């Protein structure tokens, strides 16, 4: 069904025809259409009682949130809500979204990408997350999040029982304090299975924070670390992580500074653990990329830790890898924050 037909019917102001057309959609992506506020009001009326659409993607702009809120309060089939682009989501606009989601029982995936979320608006978003009994996937990409946002989100995630997929991509304003708050909570989180931390400058000491979390976490199976400036030195640390964490089955390492040396260190984890790595747009030679692809294509299914330990020579490639350098002040910050957290909890 053509999206242009929707525009045509909107111009005709015929809600009956609009409802019939929408019944032919299950995934409705309106980001390529220019819809004025008046027409979006009519579209929202038609969406309220729609029974076929499960995914709704719209471009965020002023005036949209009120109508979206009305849709979410009445619609019982939309599971995936995606807001893309826009400038800044204000407090009133985020509160409108909250009103809609507070009364909604069907949305399981919430994605907000590209729009700036000031801290005051983020507090309302955290209320949404904290109160929701259905949201399992939370995507917050390129929203201008900073340390304060991460610290608040970490507090919410500590008690959240529904989120299993979390994406925090492009948080270029995040510094050590916010990152430490997040990884500390994730250490003992048993629900989040998929974690996207791409484009967050996670290299060197910051990669060490992440590595310490992954050594303790036993839930994450899919990890996206693309575009973080990760080097072969960071891969040495990742090897140590994968020696003890056997739950991870997929790691996206694309768009990093990894060479053949770093990729070679991870070959055992493809062949024995069955871990799938993505090294696209790294600094691998064509030959090494071919070797990686062949190994991934023929890799075994993930096996139990008991079976892994029985595989002779499984950790041979890591035996000569030196331990990571002391982190000094950064490690002290991590230990200090843990102690403060424990003292507060008691």
Image: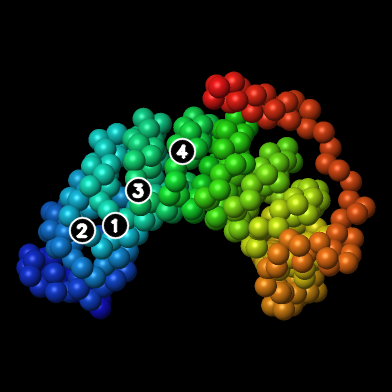
The answer to whether residue 203 is visible is: no
How far apart marks 4 and 2 lie (CA) works out to: 28 Å
- The residue located at (34%, 40%) in the rendering is 131
Asked if residue 338 lies left or right of residue 12, the reply is: right
Give the label, 4 or 2, closer to the camera: 4
Q: Position of residue 63 (x, y in %)?
A: 21, 46
- Give residue 312's quadrant in the image: bottom right
Could you say whether the residue bearing mark 4 is in a helix, strand or loop? helix
Q: Are marks 2 and 1 in contact (CB under 8 Å)?
A: yes
Please indicate whether residue 99 sits to the left or right of residue 234 in the image: left
Q: Answer whether labels 3 and 2 touch (C-beta < 8 Å).
A: no
How dense is the environment of label 4, judged by Cα within 10 Å: few (below 14), some, or many (20 and up)? few
Residue placed under numbered mark 3 in the picture: 133
Q: What quarter of the picture does the C terminus occupy?
A: top right
* Label located before the other in sequence (4 or 3): 3
Label located before the other in sequence (4 or 2)? 2
Farthest residue toward the front? Answer: 306
The residue tagged 4 is 159
* Residue of label 1: 106
Dot 2: what SS? loop
Q: Which residue is mark 2?
A: 75
Q: Earlier in the sequence, mark 1 or mark 4?
A: 1
């Amino acid at each position: 069904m053509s999206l242009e037909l929707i525009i045509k019917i909107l111009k005709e102001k015929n809600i009956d025809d609009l409802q019939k057309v929408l019944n032919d959609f299950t995934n409705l992506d309106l980001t390529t259409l220019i819809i004025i506020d008046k027409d979006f009001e009519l579209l929202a009326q038609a969406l309220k009682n729609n029974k076929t659409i499960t995914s709704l993607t719209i471009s965020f702009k002023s005036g949209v949130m009120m109508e979206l809120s009305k849709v979410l309060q009445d619609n019982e089939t939309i599971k995936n809500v995606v807001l893309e682009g826009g400038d800044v989501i204000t407090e009133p606009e985020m509160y409108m979204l909250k009103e809609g989601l507070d009364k909604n029982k069907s949305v399981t995936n919430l994605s907000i990408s590209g729009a700036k979320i000031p801290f005051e608006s983020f507090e309302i978003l955290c209320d949404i997350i904290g109160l929701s009994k259905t949201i399992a996937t939370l995507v917050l990409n390129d929203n201008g999040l900073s340390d304060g946002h991460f610290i608040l989100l970490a507090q919410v995630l500590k008690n959240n029982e529904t989120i299993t997929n979390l994406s925090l991509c492009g948080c270029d304003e995040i510094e050590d304090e916010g990152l430490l708050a997040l990884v500390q909570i994730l250490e003992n989180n048993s629900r989040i299975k998929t974690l996207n931390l791409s484009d967050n400058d996670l290299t060197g000491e910051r990669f060490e924070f992440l590595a310490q979390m992954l050594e303790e976490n036993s839930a994450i199976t899919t990890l996206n670390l693309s575009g973080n400036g990760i080097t072969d030195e960071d891969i040495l640390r990742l090897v140590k992580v994968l020696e003890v964490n056997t739950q991870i089955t997929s790691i996206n390492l694309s768009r990093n500074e990894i060479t053949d040396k770093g990729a070679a260190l991870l070959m055992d984890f493809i062949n024995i653990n069955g871990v799938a790595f993505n090294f696209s747009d790294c600094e691998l030679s064509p030959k090494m990329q071919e070797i990686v692809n062949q190994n991934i294509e023929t890799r075994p299914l993930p096996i139990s830790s008991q079976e892994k330990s029985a595989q002779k020579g499984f950790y041979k490639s890591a035996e000569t890898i030196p331990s990571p350098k002391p982190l000094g002040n950064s490690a002290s910050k991590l230990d200090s924050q843990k102690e403060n957290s424990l003292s507060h909890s008691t």
